[in-house]
Image: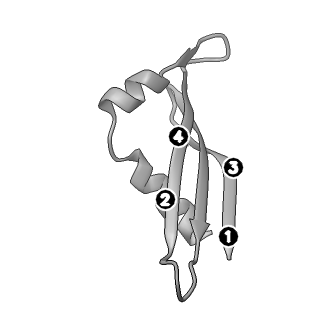
């Protein structure tokens, strides 16, 4: 069975919001093909307020680690 989720992972604090646009795919496999899962981060936006939104996707790919695990846990628990 193939599953595809296109969604946003959102972290909100008092001073900023972080929105990660992602696509998660999972194939449970078969007796011939093993299970597969993939998480693709399309865009990461940092909102400091309503007027200030920064596209930090490249920064995310270059420097940030760990949020992929949080997103995977959220979609796997859903």
The tag earlier along the polypeptide, 3 or 4, is 3
Distance between mark 2 and mark 1 Cα atoms: 16 Å
Looking at the rendered image, the disc whose residue lies closer to the viewer, 4 or 1, is 1
Work out whether 53 lies above or below 39.
Answer: above
61 and 54: which is toward the camera: 61
Distance between mark 3 and mark 1 Cα atoms: 13 Å
Residue contact between numbered discs 3 and 2, judged by CB atoms under 8 Å: no
Residue at position x 44%, y 54% in the image:
70
Distance between mark 4 and mark 2 Cα atoms: 11 Å
Distance between mark 3 and mark 2 Cα atoms: 12 Å
Secondary element under disc 2, as helix, strand or loop, is helix
Secondary element under disc 3, as helix, strand or loop, is strand
The tag earlier along the polypeptide, 4 or 1, is 1
Tag of residue 2: 1
The tag earlier along the polypeptide, 2 or 1, is 1
Residue contact between numbered discs 4 and 1, judged by CB atoms under 8 Å: no
Secondary element under disc 1, as helix, strand or loop, is strand
Residue occupied by mark 3: 6
Secondary element under disc 4, as helix, strand or loop, is strand
Q: Callout 4: few (<14), some (14-19), or many (20+) C-alpha neighbours within 10 Å?
A: some
Residue at position x 54%, y 19% in the image:
55
The tag earlier along the polypeptide, 4 or 2, is 4
Q: Is residue 61 visible?
A: yes
Corner quadrant of residue 26: bottom right
Residue occupied by mark 2: 72
Q: Is residue 19 visible?
A: no
Distance between mark 3 and mark 4 Cα atoms: 10 Å
Corner quadrant of residue 10: top right
Q: Is residue 14 left or right of residue 1?
A: left
């Amino acid at each position: 069975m193939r599953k595809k989720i296109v969604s946003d992972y959102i972290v909100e604090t008092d001073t900023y919001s972080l929105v990660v646009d992602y696509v998660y795919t999972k194939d449970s496999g078969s007796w011939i093909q093993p299970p597969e899962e993939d998480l693709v981060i399309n865009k990461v936006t940092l909102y400091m307020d309503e007027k200030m939104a920064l596209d930090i996707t490249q920064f995310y790919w270059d420097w940030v680690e760990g949020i992929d695990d949080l997103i995977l846990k959220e979609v796997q628990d859903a």
